[in-house]
Amino acid sequence: MLVLGLETSCDDTGAAIVDDAGRVLADVVQSQVVHAEFGGIVPELASRDHLKNGGPVLRAALAKAGVTLADIDGIAVTCRPGLSGALLVGVQLARGLAWATGKPVVGVDHLVGHLLAVFLSYPDLTPVEPPEFPFVALLASGGHTALYRVDGLEMQSVRELGATRDDAAGEAFDKVAKVLGLGYPGGPVIDRLAKEGNPDGVPLARPMAGKHSLEFSFSGIKTSVARWVEANGRPGDDQTLRDVCATFQRRVVDTLVKKAVRAAEKEGVKSLVLAGGVAANRELRERATAAGEKVGLRVVVPPFRACTDNAAMIAYAGLTRLTRGEDDSETLTVSPRTALATVTKKGSGRRGA
């Protein structure tokens, strides 16, 4: 079976062709640069760019895979969560293609796509040995940060263990980068500068580093950086800037790793999977792997291209439903919220628990 995946949940327009073994025949992503000057995503501009890029990205993916729409057996498209206008562009494209070709189309939860991206294989990369079920996954991105237990390929097999009460980890990176005048997106530049900084160079809060909770909170450390800048001024391109980045990143990574390993031990699983855009962070990958080795836990990290938003993970996540003969052609809608059940209440509870 060949599946066409479409992804337009935020600021990346993606189209991919994946077979039923998870082999990625093509994965084309057009990232939007229009948001950089605004320091964050502008929803209306995102929708406009998806409208402009959707057709060219689709044609590029088909050409790269060496197939036509007639060769595609089914279509999978991100329908939630994300920016409603952006999601609608992808869903309308998918429904139009399904109507024109007579092929089935299924909606995919973007978070489920991230959780299953570890099962993708790329022809130009050394294959990553996939984890055994069940496993615990740390999903950290610009819009979400949560821990999940994953017992199978279907959405019903995913259970949230804990999530952020406020800002997502990737959102904190972007906001801190803005405070420091580093531009958008902030994750890659902070990671680069942190490599040459002192991770204990400035006094910053430790985000919700308690012993028992599997929940996160990153608004405090974001505010801590902002107050440090207010008191000391914005650092220039010097060692102080590198120290601020290194300290901030170490605080966030330590919290993510500590709680992810704790969740895996609590659930009694053998593998911990890193997922989402923040999983591309150098320090997170290194420290999570080292922490796992200490307790006999296998840490599985997807290739960098599978961590950030892409359509290949959406195609793979839609495979199970398409194989069962499901078709959302008449019912496909969009939603800004995930369909996964949540246990964490935003903004609630005692901080530092």
Image: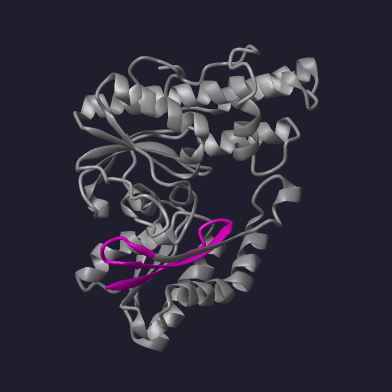
Q: Visible in this render: residue 214?
A: no
Provide residue 225's location: percent of width, then percent of height: 66, 22
Q: Is residue 7 magenta?
A: yes
In this view, the residue in front, 182 or 159, is 182
Provide residue 196's location: percent of width, then percent of height: 64, 23
Q: Is residue 336 magenta?
A: no
- Indicate left or right for 55 with 255 as reference: right
Vertical arrangement, residue 10 with respect to residue 56, above or below: above
- Indicate left or right for 18 with 202 as reference: left
Provide residue 303's location: percent of width, then percent of height: 43, 47
In this view, the residue in front, 50 or 227, is 50
Residue drawn at x 39%, y 50% as measured from the top left? 114
Vertical arrangement, residue 194 with respect to residue 324, above or below: above
Q: Which residues are magenta?
A: 1-24
Provide residue 282's location: percent of width, then percent of height: 51, 33
Vertical arrangement, residue 350 with respect to residue 285, above or below: above
- Indicate left or right for 309 with 2 as reference: right
> From the image, which quarter does the N terminus lie in?
bottom left
Residue drawn at x 33%, y 62% as measured from the top left? 23
What colour scheme was applied to this rendering of the protein? one colour
Q: How many marks?
A: 0
Quadrant for residue 39, please give it. Answer: top right
Give the main secondary structure of the magenta stretch.
strand
